Image (cartoon, grey):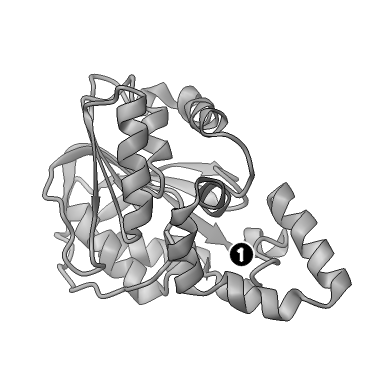
Amino acid sequence: MRDAEAVAYRLLHETGLLRPATKLLGSPALWRASGLLESAALFATGGSAGSIGEYVESMEKRWAPFDRWFTDAPRALDFGTGLGGNLLGLRGRLGTGLGIDLNPFYITRARRLAERYGARQLRFEAYDGVHLPFEGPYDVILCTGTFERLRKPAVAAYVRRLALALAPNGRFLAYFLTAGARAQGFGRLLGQESYVFWAEEELAELLRSSGLELEERIPRFPTSGDLLVMRRRSAGVRPGTDAVAVRGAPA
């Protein structure tokens, strides 16, 4: 559990405000409105307070050990981009990058940040949860702050659609909360029932049904869950193209 969340949980618990605060913080309306203020957006997407410069620098450091996934100026898609931190942190290694998010306020801020940092190769688009504004193929697909708040059928539909946009030799990097993250107390502030935790057999079935295979697993990256590095199965079961309809879900 992130430090800021631990402190907030303790204070709310001691003052008896935990239950009403949990309901408020978990509401889609508040999540969307968080994009109106820079400080609130940073806390909602990164779990900590700080400046934009610190945020971007932290994202650069996050991805620095993984150059092997970003060689030859890849074309990247960041699904659930938030403020665009993943792409901004990787801006020096990408040929092009597209970040998409349900929250239009986040997208507005991400565009401003890309302009501020001179990242002209990055583009950010809002979408309605149904019509996904991308085609592919992409050499790298990122998703590090989205699936932990979405129901499993919706995640499965998204993963199958994203797998279709993956280049034959591309990599799909997605963050999931596992049973280990639950045991560590992840999500106590909003209540663990607000999050979606995956059993190992469920993840295995998700990959199988999406025509993907696991290449590498990075534990506790970026937080208590695991980053799965996936690629298309060489034999290739073509993923389905289930319609996706998820509105108001935090990214």
SS at badge 1:
helix
Check disc 1: other Cα within 10 Å, few if <14, some if 14-19, many if 20+. some
Q: Residue at x 55, y 52 (%)?
A: 40
Q: Is residue 32 above or below residue 76?
A: below
Q: Which part of the image, by quadrant, shows the C terminus?
A: bottom left
List x then y, in percent, for residue 96.
Answer: 20, 30
List x then y, in percent, for residue 58.
Answer: 55, 30
Q: Is residue 131 above or below residue 4?
A: below
Please tell me in which quadrant of the rendered image residue 97 appears.
top left
Residue on which the image places disc 1? 179
* Residue farthest along the right direction in this orientation: 14
List x then y, in percent, for residue 123.
Answer: 22, 38
Q: Residue at x 55, y 43 (%)?
A: 222
Q: Is residue 240 above or below residue 146?
A: below
**Which sits in the foreground, 113 or 189?**
113
List x then y, in percent, for residue 18.
Answer: 75, 75
Q: Which residue type carries mark 1?
A: Ala
